[in-house]
Image (cartoon, rainbow, N blue to C red):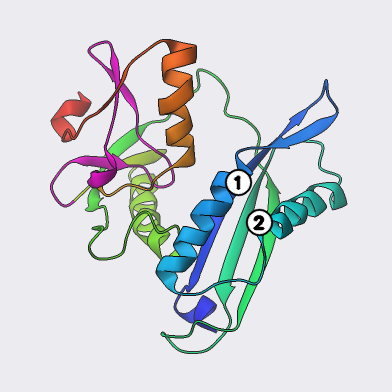
Amino acid sequence: SAAVFYATNVFEGLRAYWNERDGEVYAFRLADHFARLRESMKMMRFTVPYSDDDLFEAVRAVLTGNEIREDVHMHLVAYVLGAGVDATTPTGFYINPRRRPRVTEGKGLACCVSSWVRTSDNAIPIRLKCGANYQNGRLAKLQAKTDGYDDLILLNQRGKVAEGTGATFFMVRKGRIVTPGTSNDILESITRTTLMEYVCPTVLGMEVVRYGHGRVGLR
């Protein structure tokens, strides 16, 4: 199939958090994830025969059917089953939940600036959340781990900071929070939007600045 041979798929990574007090599991910004999934499918020129209501119900069925009582990360994947690089039908869809506990506060990562360069938006759009796009980060991460690092920071072809393998980049610089703009070959991250629109100004009380800095700005 095209999904296996050419990585003709798009996906969303959905987080759901178990709340012990409420006895409920809460999923994070599902409607936004579904909207981005459809944008990715549009760029890849295929669709799945499911409405957003169907997707909401599918997520609910996965969480209840598996009796989830912990924090999980779910892969929601749409793919093309047909053969050939230009196949657009037939299509398939699945949701795969897996355990992923919350990050321990205060536990950092040792990161390097990768010698691999972030894929250009003019070659394959980084805002397209497809499996093929993640091979760029995979190669970079394998190299970083071989060199003794936990993770890495990718620069784009202009030498500007882009992002990590599967993470948006933020840093505190001169009393402000800075992050690369969307023109720096980055994913239009839903987590990034949440941080910029709510967490940084409301919770942290700090201004967020879109800043196209190079590796020197990381010092």
Question: In percent of the image, x 56 and y 48: which residue is there?
Answer: 33
Q: What residue type is disc 2 on?
A: Asp
**In this rendering, would 153 be left or right of 39?**
left
Whichever of callouts 1 and 2 sits on the residue coming sooner in the sequence is 1
- Foreground: 193 or 84? 193
SS at circle 1: helix
Q: Residue 195 location in percent, x, y? A: 45, 27
**In this rendering, would 93 be left or right of 114?**
right
Observer able to see residue 22:
yes
Give the alpha-carbon distance from disc 1 to disc 2, as whole Å: 8 Å
- For disc 2, the neighbor class at 10 Å (few under 14, some 14 to 19, many from 20) is few
Observer able to see residue 130:
no
Stretch of the chain drawn in magenta:
157-184
- For disc 1, the neighbor class at 10 Å (few under 14, some 14 to 19, many from 20) is few
Q: Quadrant of the C terminus?
A: top left
Q: Quadrant of the N terminus?
A: bottom right
User: Label 2: which residue?
Assistant: 52
Question: In percent of the image, x 26 and y 52: which residue is there?
Answer: 118
Residue 126 vertical position relative to residue 210 in the rendered view, above or below: below
Question: In percent of the image, x 40 and y 27: which residue is there?
Answer: 196
User: Label 1: which residue?
Assistant: 31
**In the image, is residue 167 part of the stretch drawn in magenta?**
yes
Q: Residue 4 location in percent, x, y? A: 53, 77
**In the image, is residue 9 part of the stretch drawn in magenta?**
no
Question: In percent of the image, x 62 and y 57: which residue is there?
Answer: 76
